[in-house]
Each structure stands twice: as C-alpha cells, then as structure tokens.
Image (spheres, rainbow, N blue to C red):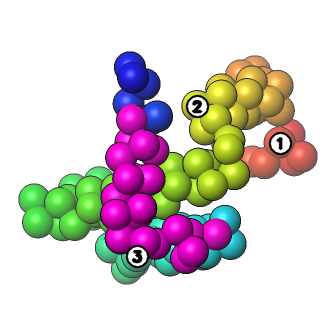
C-alpha cells in the first residue's frame, strides 16, 4: 500500500479492532470526537496575539502537533466509517474553491465567496 493516508486508515482500523472499539466508532461519535479535538487544538492559541501564534516555543509546538494529530486521526477514521476517499474529496473541493475564489477577485482579501 503506497498511499500513506490509506495505510494510516488501515492502522487505525486495526488499532480500534484490537480494542473492540468498533461499536463506539459511529460516524456521529467520530464527528463529535473530531470537534472536541479541534477545540483542544484551538485552546492552545486562545488569548495569543497573531504574532505569538506564529512563534510557539518547542513545548507548545509539540502539544499543538499532538492535537493536530488527534484531529487527523479522527478525520481519517470518519472517512473510513463513511467510505469516503478523503484525498479525492479534498481535490474536488480545491477545484470548487478555485471557482468560488478566482485569483483576480480574491487576492489579498478574506471575504467569503458570496461577498466577492
């Protein structure tokens, strides 16, 4: 298996199966866990200035990396539970975003596509 994301999905499935966690890994529960982990990621940036958020010390950076990993792990598990090719979905979404946010209209601003 060459695709690292597919390998990760397979490893996560084996990890969960070894612990008999399948009954707990419904799409609803995985999406909920993903949201919790994303909130824990955000917590590391709460109250920081923009500049501070770009200049994390080594310990904070490691903690952020682990929270990011948790988000990725739950997202991959959710894609497996729903049989969604996450990379294909991401590629398709990038095409949609390129149409919604043409370079000429989007360069240098953060407005939503409906406000352009």
Which residues lie in the magenta part? Answer: 7-26
Q: Is residue 6 visible?
A: yes
Element type at mark 2: helix
The circle drawn on residue 113 is 1
Q: Which is more N-terminal, label 1 or label 3?
A: 3
Are circles 3 and 2 on residues that touch, CB within 8 Å?
no
Residue 105 % position (x, y): 78, 28
In this rendering, is residue 41 above or below 79?
Answer: below
Q: CA distance from mark 3 to mark 1?
A: 28 Å
Q: Which is more N-terminal, label 2 or label 3?
A: 3
44 with respect to 38 (left or right): left
Q: Residues within 10 Å of mark 3 (few under 14, many from 20)?
A: some
Q: Residue at x 39, y 23 (%)?
A: 1
The circle drawn on residue 40 is 3
The circle drawn on residue 87 is 2
Q: Nearer the viewer, residue 52 or 63?
A: 63
Q: Residue at x 68, y 41 (%)?
A: 84
Asked if residue 24 is among those painted magenta in the image, a careful observer would answer: yes
Q: Residue at x 52, y 68 (%)?
A: 22
Q: Nearer the viewer, residue 42 or 3?
A: 3
Q: Which is more N-terminal, label 1 or label 2?
A: 2
Q: Nearer the viewer, mark 2 or mark 1?
A: 2
Q: Name the quarter where the C terminus is drawn.
A: top right
Q: CA distance from mark 2 to mark 1?
A: 23 Å
């Amino acid at each position: 298996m060459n695709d690292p994301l597919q390998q990760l999905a397979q490893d996560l499935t084996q990890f969960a199966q070894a612990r008999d966690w399948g009954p707990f890994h419904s799409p609803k529960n995985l999406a909920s866990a993903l949201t919790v982990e994303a909130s824990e990621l955000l917590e590391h940036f709460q109250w920081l200035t923009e500049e501070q958020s770009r200049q994390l010390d080594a310990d904070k950076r490691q903690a952020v990396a682990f929270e990011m990993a948790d988000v990725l792990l739950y997202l991959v598990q959710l894609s497996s539970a729903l049989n969604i090719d996450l990379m294909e979905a991401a590629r398709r979404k990038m095409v949609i975003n390129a149409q919604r946010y043409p370079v000429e209209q989007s360069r240098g601003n953060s407005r939503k596509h409906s406000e352009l």
